[in-house]
Image (cartoon, rainbow, N blue to C red):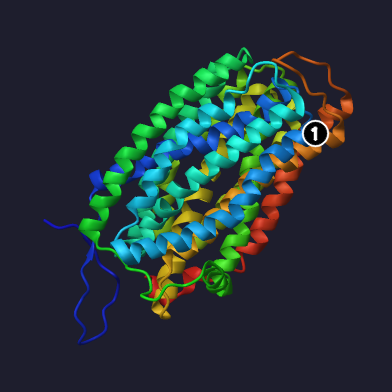
Amino acid sequence: MTDIETPGPVPAGAAAEVIPRPQLKHLAAYGSGSLGMGVWVTVPGLLLLYFLTNTLGVSPFVAGLALLVPKIIDAVVHPTFGSWSDRLARRDGHRRGMLRWGLLLGVAMCAMFAVPSGMTGASAALWVGCWYVVGNLLFAAFQVPYLTTPSDLRVGYHERTRVFMVRMVLLTVGLLVAGVVAPAMVEDGARSSYVQMAAVLGVAMLASGVVAIRGVRRLTETCGFRTPDARAHSTLADVRVAWSDRDFRMLVLSYLFTGTTTHLVLAAVPFYATYVLDDSRLIAVLMGAFLAPAVFASPVWMRVSRRIGKQRGLLTSQVMFVVGTAALLAGEQIGVALSVAVVVVLGVAFAGLQLFAFSMVPDAVAAAESRGSSRAGAYTGVWTATEAVGTAIGPYVYSAVLAIGGFAAAVDGDSLPQTDTALQALLIGFTVVPAVLMTIAVVLQRRCRLDQSAPLR
């Protein structure tokens, strides 16, 4: 029996439209690509700043630049890849050609951590930064067409959330494995340990990408494929169309601050565990507490979406994150157990932030299509560019706070004493700063009216 989703009330005299419901096995194959994506998102975000400052002897200011510049380049690359993806989809009837380039991402990650022996300071930062650019280009080649898939499928409002829910669960597994395994493998701070870690996870990224490409093909075969506009558009024209969409613009701006906040927190976890909770072994514990809840929270958030809609669900998640990060300001006073409990709440909120925000992008594409414009790749390119910028700004903001506080960099994992000012800056950067940034995200998200668009349902 064919799985279908009813699109809602049907006008009198009109035939009901049969909307296919993707099979779970195809969704799982598609979502497996997020295992590898989770590794790339987590490992650089979690370890690169710490690797640069505590193993390669790079100052926080220079380390922040090494992480920021490659991501700023993504702001140009992603929209370009989005338009290119639309052109390939018009020509080939699918986007799988670009996806295959992403299979080389594991090689770039290995090279990024394989800094030549004896190279420290600015030269080491340059090596890492250059390979980070290469990796981000390969990641964009996979990510843009991959995340466009839910917009390409001819499915309904709630099914788009379901596609992202399965993807989110598997993404969380990737984030969790990388967030726990990677720190454990490099606990000694040795360069060779970082290279071994990158090699092991690089193989896993390759395997997940191969399975995902097959999943994309199965989904488009069973659920249909929305072909982009027949006429080719320039990248600049595509960006203008996407940016002129007010509701999509508010969603994008809100997610810029959301992504900045979550990746700031991710980059700050090793510092918080080591210097505030005084135990570097808690890095893996905190990462597990942050990511593991999303495995069960994502299906719960999907039920919430069916009751109150994605907009209200997203706002609820954002407010939870504000309260949670502010509470961690008292980390030393409340102790390890309560700190971990608060991080669990942040993890539940994180699942909602990802699920609701990403599943609203296909809704924006569907709304635009109802107005006569179909440019799913262009919308996704703008979205992923925003995500890339947020992932860069977050660690950079935190590194800037460390630099202002006078944090002392180290070489090969050596522990250096930190001043009270540096420790205070380290704590404020992990608590007060993300709470303020997420509050801005809430204000912007409240101006988005996408859930009120009738064509979405």
- Say whether residue 448 is visible: no
Determine whether 427 is above or below 74 in the image. Answer: above
Would residue 442 appear left or right of 374 to someone viewing this image?
right
Q: Which residue is mark 1?
A: 402
Image location (x, y in percent) of residue 47: 61, 28
Say which residue appears at 42% left-offset and 65% top-offset.
376
Front residue of 205 and 126: 126
Image location (x, y in percent) of residue 101: 41, 44
Would residue 241 appear left or right of 211 to someone viewing this image?
right
Front residue of 99 and 33: 99
Say which residue appears at 61% left-offset and 20% top-offset.
282
Image location (x, y in percent) of residue 32: 35, 39
Front residue of 40 and 320: 40
Helix, strand or loop at label 1? It is: helix
Badge 1 amino acid:
Leu
Residue 86 placement: quadrant? bottom left
